Image: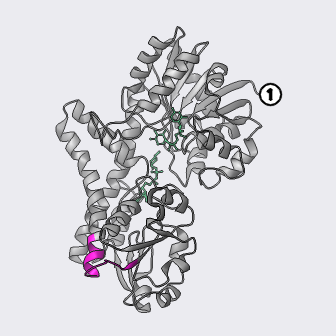
Amino acid sequence: MSNLTKNILCIGAGYVGVPSMAMIAYKCPEYKVTVVDIDSGRINAWNSNILPIYEPGLDKIIQKTRNINLFFSTDVENEIKKNDIIFICVNTPTKNHGIGAGKATDLQYLENVIRQIGKYSNSPKIIVEKSTVPVRTAGFIKKILDTESEYSFTILSNPEFMAEGTAINDLAFPARVLIGSDETESGIAARNELIEIYSAWIPTEKIITTNLWSSELSKLAANAFLAQRISSINSISALCEKTGADITEISHSVGMDERIGGKFLTSGIGFGGSCFKKDISSLIYLCECYGLTEVAAYWEGVLNINEYQQKRFVDKIVKSCNSIAEKKICVLGCAFKTDSDDVRESPAIGIIKQLQEEGAHIVVSDPQALKSLSRQFGETIRYEVDPYEAVKECNLVLLLTDWNIFKNLDYAKIYKSMEKPAYIFDGRNIIDIQRCKEIGFEVYSIGKG
Ligand code: UDX
Ligand code: UDX
């Protein structure tokens, strides 16, 4: 271990913390990287052969680094003492109670960790905010540390822009790495330490620096802009259904304008995931707190269209079948996106709940996310790994996640095993509509007249 000359600690062994730290360990063999978490079950899983999250390519990087220069532990106190650079990757969900409930960011986990750092530190430290936080959180962190500890702390903001399902590629070839700091001597020195780490594999021109507040707000803004594109195309999809225009053709032609660009223009049942709704809600709350009512209303519109898109989808199902009470509905895909086992804020959850309220019986198939979904629904729905088993004797099939395997299913075989009339509702625009109609299905897609 003598070649490990530098130490890094990460608090929070989740979807963001572990892939980010595994990449640093992989690209910077001279650093000893430790990830701690209060959840011992999760840490045990990271130390085992069955990793607690599904992220393509992560297992290979962990195999190459674990117990070489990447370590997982629950010993928060000692690891804080031993490390001088501490990344914060704990969850920062939406507050569900009290002032700002449903909008404001719940900073209690972050605050707990900051207090632990203050309490256990025995030397000056660099604190790197990686968790997404409201703008000006670094000031709040500094204030707590100043009251908790006699040592000096330098705060950096280094938000993570990777997306689940493509995390490894996003971390290896990021569009940019953003580091926010104070322009003080200690701020610049800390920033340079972080630049040194990322320079091991990221071209210098992609590592950008800003003040702390720009960095914190950039993350909220980037997620808001991405989500806004999805709501923009989804709003047009509703108009397509009224007019005979086709949303796929519109995405294609609109996206060919280089000023607009073709990415993130896929219409569907709306965005899910742990970030978009939470971060736009946080942005809205910030605007309200600063008295910017019109700006808050503007971003509220992005969330409203997202809910509207899911409601429209369920309305269509119920109206097409007159009633779905006692009908068997097969949901293909419950992860919030392809290549993920994550169901946080997945559109599938709200849709399944609404269908249950209508009295339908639900069976779900998903290649990775059934375990996560079962924590939400328990025995109120049925789970089948094999999609062909899941569809048997169902009246309706709903495609709710854009997994590749669902694009290539044998829909003639599926049709045969279903009750007739057999309906397909494609919430992700992934099936060949013409072919499914020829087979005999009643087909509904998003944004097709
Ligand atoms: C991340 C970011 O941290 C969040 O701000 C961003 O907006 C979305 O992505 P994520 O990695 O997805 O969150 O969260 P999660 O998978 O829940 O992991 C957080 C981990 O922190 C959990 O394992 C939790 O046990 C741990 N934690 C929480 C601690 O170790 N200590 C605490 O005090 C609180
Ligand atoms: C997002 C951001 O992309 C990432 O930069 C940030 O760090 C975290 O939040 P993530 O939520 O993991 O990442 O996945 P993303 O690929 O952005 O997808 C979010 C949701 O939007 C998914 O439900 C996806 O299905 C949906 N989506 C995406 C669409 O409906 N249409 C699109 O064109 C793209």
**Which quarter of the figure has residue 95?**
top left
x and y percentages locating residue 400 in the rendered image = 42, 67
**Where is residue 186 drawn, in percent x and y?**
53, 14
Residue beneath the point at 54% across and 76% down: 387
- Residue 55 appears left or right of 132: right
**Segment tinted magenta in the rendering:** 315-328
The stretch drawn in magenta includes residue 313: no
Q: Is label 1 in a helix, a strand or a loop? A: loop
406 in relation to 285, above or below: below
- Where does residue 18 sit, x and y in percent of width and height? 60, 41
The residue carrying mark 1 is 3
Q: How is the image coloured?
A: one colour
- The residue depicted at 60 percent of the width and 44 percent of the height is 19
Looking at the picture, does residue 295 appear above or below residue 333? above
Q: Nearer the viewer, residue 427 or 435?
A: 427
Residue in view at x 30 percent, y 69 percent: 313
| Picture layout, residue 233 above or below residue 2 | below
Kind of residue at disc 1: Asn
Quadrant of image for the C terminus: bottom left
From this viewpoint, which residue is outermost toward the top?
150
**Is residue 127 something one can see in this rendering?**
yes
Q: Residue at x 41, y 40 (%)?
A: 93
The image shows residue 256 at horizontal and vertical percentages of 38, 62
Q: Is residue 323 magenta?
A: yes
Q: 46 or 202: which is nearer to us?
A: 46
Q: Please identify the quarter of the rendering in which residue 361 is found.
A: bottom left
* Residue 343 horizontal side relative to residue 199, left or right: left
